[in-house]
Image (cartoon, helix red, strand yellow):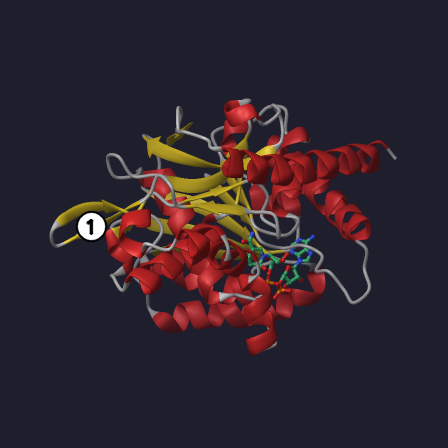
Amino acid sequence: SNDFISIVVTGAAGQIGYSLVFNIIRGDMFGTEQKVRVVLMDIEPMLEGLKGLKMEIEDSCYPLVQEIVITSDPKTAFTNVDYAVLVGGMPRKEGMQRVDLLRANAAIFKVQGKALNDYAKKTVKVLVVANPANTNALIALLNAPNIPPENFSCLTRLDHNRAKAQIAMKANVNVKDVHNIIVWGNHSLTIYPDTRCGYINLPTGKATIANVIKNEAWLQGDFVSTVQVRGAAVISARKLSSAASAAKAITDHMHDWALGTPEGEYVSMGVHSDGSYGVPVGVIFSYPVTIKNGVYSIVQGLPIDQYTREKIDLTTKELVEEKESATKILAE
Ligand code: NAX
């Protein structure tokens, strides 16, 4: 085995890439003892920008850097990688229909799924960030039959972190004291942040989120919608979409997948559904998971009330429809 980890970031010349790459080489993702070989991949017209990024990486003098590779070629990008973070995609343009966005990205994730299948290690762990993230991850998975479906995931950790931050602010506690938030389903406006199983560590001991916040109407109303539209709120304020917070969420997701979650702690991850909680098998769905030795397990047996059932069913319906559109597009 190597003494360094090899990771590819696609869309590395974009705004998330600009934060993410520094998180990786600083040691935030795999620990401050772990050397990394980082492949920066983007489309051909962005190679000049990647050259500049590589210069900045060199000038930052991070000791964990084993090697930096820049490329636009999928074979070069994916050969022998241990981890792949797929950030690059076709952005939604003014007036673009959802199906057109899906079509443009289906083409990209078909190619990248095949390249992962042919060139990456069979143990590669893949995180898809580019939107529609869940369905892009499914397309990559369907094009990589030699890699286990459990090795594909999509990013919902940003939604998870947004929910945790809202709870911490409302309860006036540190974010580190908020535990076991769940976000269910599709990384879209239907994602459902659920606090019923969560708790807060107070100086006096553990308390449920409902008991600390004492405002059920807020927890089921404004809290849910604030998390669901947070991405749009950032865009309207910043005139750019979330970037550093997305990079931090990607770093959290990969860190926990590689190194595990603390005993009893849940995180949210978009993973290949095994039918848990009545979601059909074979969509990429955000579930609460725990992780040990690089393997996630979907948390089982959580109570699902009527309200939660409706929210899970709604986001499931959207994902099943996206899967049907994707299947049609792939067959064209
Ligand atoms: P940018 O537009 O800044 O960067 C995207 C980069 O991808 C560009 O450099 C572009 O050239 C590259 N690219 C396009 N096609 C490619 C291909 N076939 N191969 C390799 N690279 C390719 O976008 P950025 O703000 O960095 O966001 C990237 C993606 O993340 C978007 O699809 C965005 O919607 C998605 N997001 C997903 C989030 C999530 O929670 N799942 C949150 C953040 C973000 O909005």
Foreground pick, 233 / 115: 233
Q: Nearer the viewer, residue 100 or 29?
A: 100
User: For the residue carrying disc 1, how many other residues have a C-alpha within 10 Å: few (<14), some (14-19), or many (20+)?
Assistant: some
Q: Is mark 1 within 8 Å of ligand 1?
A: no
Does residue 97 lie above or below 127 as drawn? Answer: below
Quadrant location of the N terminus in the rendered image: top left
Q: Is residue 283 left or right of residue 17?
A: right
Res. 276 in view: yes
Point out the quarter of the image occupied by ligand 1: bottom right
Q: Report the quarter where the C terminus lies.
A: top right
Question: Measuring 58% from the left and 37% from the top, which residue is drawn there?
Answer: 310
| In this rendering, position of residue 114 left or right of residue 100 | left
Outermost right residue: 332
Where's residue 184, x and y in %? 51, 40
Q: Position of residue 233 (x, y in %)?
A: 56, 69
In this image, 255 relative to 91: left or right? left
Q: In x, y percent, where is residue 278?
A: 56, 24
Q: Quadrant of residue 63?
A: bottom left
Figure quadrant of residue 321: top right
Residue 99 vs residue 118, the one in the foreground? 99
Q: Quadrant of residue 71?
A: bottom right
Label 1 sits on what residue type? Asn
Q: Which residue is mark 1?
A: 201
Location of residue 3 with respect to 63 vertically, above or below: above
Q: Residue at x 51, y 26 (%)?
A: 277
Instruction: Determine whether 280 is above or below 66 in the image.
Output: above
Task: Decide if residue 80 is in sight here.
Answer: no
> What residue sits 26% from the left and 35% below the top?
264
Counting the numbered discs, the total is 1
Query: Residue 320, position in %: x, y?
Result: 70, 33
Where disc 1 sits, the SS reads: strand
